[in-house]
Structure formats: C-alpha cells, structure tokens
Image (cartoon, helix red, strand yellow):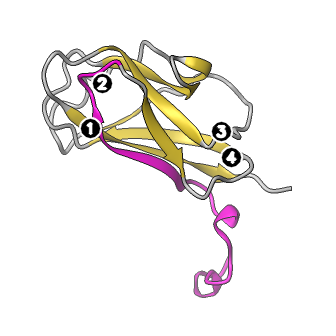
C-alpha cells in the first residue's frame, strides 16, 4: 500500500492496532482490573499484550488476563505469568498468550493477579491486535 494513500483506510486494514489499555494497573492487588477494548469491535484477534512502566521492580507479581471477572471465561494470559522482567520503568514485557485461536468479542478483558507484589506498585498494560471484519 502506498504510504501516501492510507488516510482513507480504516484501522481494520492494518495489523497490530492498539485495542485497549489499562494505565496504572495495581500490581499489589488480586482484584479484577478492567481493560476496556476501545470502540468495542464486534470481533478482534489479540496478537500481543505488553506490560511496561512499572513503578518499582516487580519481583513477585504473578497473574493472568481473562475474558470475564473472577478469573472466568477464557484465560488470554495464564495465571502463572510472572512480571519480574519489569525491573525498572523503562523495561517492557510481552506477556505469553495462551494458545487459543478463537477471535474475541468481549468488550473488556480483566487483569487478575494470583500473587500480588507485596508493596505498592503499578504498571501499564497495552493490548494490540487486529479487528476482524466480514
């Protein structure tokens, strides 16, 4: 595609757009934390979830991302995901996606830690993927 002619194209024509975000996720809480999917596309494929901008080194935080509250629905990221790579605010971590080939329709995802950090801590979570159209 000619880079000079992308203005009229819709986001569903590009790969890896930002689908949703959770800024300032509480990494010291096991409560469900909502990640709203922007513009609520009817169908989307999650390609990557990135955690970054940790307020402290996340040495003990572990947990997953789900399609429903209380670790319900489908695990998009397993409950065993460790965030220890986030040792400074400049670090990022591509979370390991569960092997599931279904497209998603949920208007929200939920971060739910199984092990909290043990001290006040935050991080930002970004969900990237593709919008599916018929």
Q: Residue at x 55, y 55 (%)?
A: 38
**Left or right, 24 with reference to 106:** left
User: CA–CA distance between discs 4 and 3?
Assistant: 9 Å
Quick check: marks 2 and 1 in contact, CB under 8 Å? yes
Measured in 3D between alpha carbons, the distance from the residue under mark 1 to the one under mark 4, in whole angstroms, is 24 Å
- How far apart in space, not on screen, are marks 2 and 4 (Cα)? 25 Å
Q: CA distance from mark 2 to mark 3?
A: 24 Å
Q: Which mark is residue 106?
A: 3
In the image, residue 65 sits, relative to residue 6, either above or below, namely above
Q: Quadrant of the N terminus?
A: bottom right
Q: Which residue is mark 2?
A: 83
Measured in 3D between alpha carbons, the distance from the residue under mark 1 to the one under mark 3, in whole angstroms, is 23 Å
Residue 80 coordinates in the image, percent (x, y): 42, 12
Disc 1 designates what residue?
A: 123
- The CA span between labels 2 and 1 is 10 Å
- The part of the chain drawn in magenta is 1-30
Does the magenta portion include 18? Answer: yes
Among the 4 quarters of the image, the one containing residue 99: top right
Q: Nearer the viewer, residue 60 or 33?
A: 33
Query: Which dot, 2 or 1, sits closer to the camera?
Result: 1
Query: Do the numbered discs 1 and 4 sit on residues whose CB atoms are within 8 Å?
Result: no
């Amino acid at each position: 595609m000619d880079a000079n002619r992308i203005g009229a194209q819709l986001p569903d024509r590009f790969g890896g757009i930002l689908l949703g975000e959770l800024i300032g996720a509480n990494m010291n809480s096991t409560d469900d934390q909502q990640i709203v999917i922007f513009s609520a596309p009817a169908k989307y494929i999650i390609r990557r979830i990135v955690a970054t901008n940790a307020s402290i080194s996340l040495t003990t935080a572990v947990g997953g991302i789900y399609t429903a509250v209380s670790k319900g629905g489908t695990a998009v990221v397993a409950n065993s995901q460790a965030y220890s790579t986030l040792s400074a605010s400049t670090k990022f971590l591509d979370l390991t996606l569960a092997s599931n080939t279904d497209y998603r329709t949920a208007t929200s995802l939920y971060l739910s830690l199984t092990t909290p950090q043990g001290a006040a801590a935050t991080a930002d979570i970004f969900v990237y993927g593709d919008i599916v159209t018929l």
